[in-house]
Image: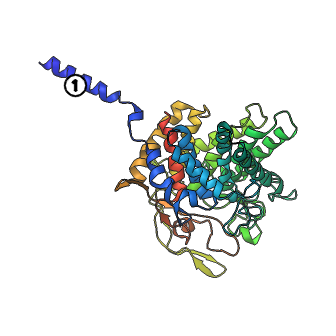
Amino acid sequence: MKNYLLLAISLFMLACSSIRKEDSPKWSQRMVESHGLVDFYTNRHHQAKLADTEWDYVSGLVASAVLKAWIMYPEKTEYYEAVKAFADRNLNEDGTMILNSRGGSAIRPSNIDDLPAGRIFFTLYEEEMRKGNTKDAERYKTAATMLRNTLKYEHERIPEELPGTGGFYHKAVYPNQMWLDGLYMGSPLYAQWQHNFGKPGSDEHPESWDDIALQFKTVHQYTYNPEKQLNYHAWSADPGDPNSFWANKEEPFIGASKEFWGRGMGWYFAALADVLEYMPEDHKDYNDVLNIYRQVAAGLKRRQDQESGVWYQLLQYDATKTADGKGDTIAGEVYNVCTAPNYLEASCSSIFTYSYLKGIRLGLLDKATYQPVAEKAYQGLLKTFIREDEGKTNIIQTCASAGLGPAKDPSRTGTVNYYLCGKDVTIVENEGKAIGTFIMASLEYERL
């Protein structure tokens, strides 16, 4: 009898262990259907429906994530149709202009945040060509090309007389500044265009890859702290400029901001993974970009919270770090006064998880080293940030936004006090920057 009981237990355990991963919940689909297609926030502005949302980088991130979900689950045709409707709502008839609510251009001069939503056009082009809808396909190709050319030929760059020559401004209002965020906003679109529509035999093709690599090499040179193994949020080539009041004025790390912000490093990590997916391996700068990616991966591994598996808003600290209660004094005015603690943050944790899993899948990262990090992180996302409520999947504990300056906004100091107490750095839920990155992380996990 005892032997039969042991046999039964063994068979039960074997059956449990062999349950297929595809039978477990598809968290990507849950999030798409709860908040990707409807009911999400873009920088605290509520959006009722993806198809009706105006153009910006947050709505574009959500749209890109939903489109990735459709690629993996093509039977979910409503995902594709929602993204196509979003694109068509914001694009003029011939694809030469992204429209704002007033009928003008939504692409502001030298504003890198206005570009990344255009990554949806590559998949839309391919699918409409497959369907034989060449009119829409060419319209999407025209739009993607317009955005790439706007970045490459029209976007302001750091001039020759300053360090970092050729680096893209983050925005015109931040002259001679490069932020980690901007690497995600510009470089993957540029890289994907080169992969899809560039001409490998032309002189322009390798030069464009030189340009893409330059952005990473420049930012890494001036923001990477090898002792901490982390990148400062931003860098100014002209730290004496009033708009760069937040920048270090002395060595080491002259021009760099003061702290290591989670989502800023998340954008940077994802940009590296996304560009390396397309960058030719025989390009002279490929190994430089790959080495930067691996340095970032190693540094973030070191900062993973061992209990939860996820990451903090300010990466070099844990929850014992708090704002100082005194605030920051700028030109006699005091800002960012509170004693809030550092906290586990959803969007950076999601995008780190995505970037690890994608790097493992593409063979960019050592699987034995990083698979445990990524799997622990994904389970941490579910436990720490995901909440089920009346049939909807919600994501909590997201930093709404964070930035540095400009001079007209002296509260954005880049200090610990700012990242924990700033007027725009509030903690929110169901924000598009967490929704989109969680969908992307889930899709990568579901491919394991």
Residue occupying the far left of the picture: 1
Q: Quadrant of residue 263?
A: bottom right
Considering only vertical position in the picture, is 290 above or below 136?
A: above
Q: Position of residue 344 (x, y in %)?
A: 46, 56
All told, the count of numbered labels is 1
- Which residue is located at x 59 percent, y 57 percent? 59
Considering only vertical position in the picture, is 211 above or below 422?
A: above
Kind of residue indicated by mark 1: Ile
Q: Nearer the viewer, residue 270 or 193?
A: 193
Q: Which structural element holds mark 1?
A: helix
Q: Position of residue 32 (x, y in %)?
A: 48, 50
Residue 136 shows in this picture: yes
Question: What residue is disc 1 on?
Answer: 9
Q: Position of residue 37 (x, y in %)?
A: 51, 54
Q: Nearer the viewer, residue 168 or 323?
A: 168
Residue 314 shows in this picture: no
Q: Nearer the viewer, residue 76 or 30?
A: 76
Q: Is residue 138 left or right of residue 16?
A: right
* Quadrant (top left/top right/bottom left/bottom right) for the N terminus: top left
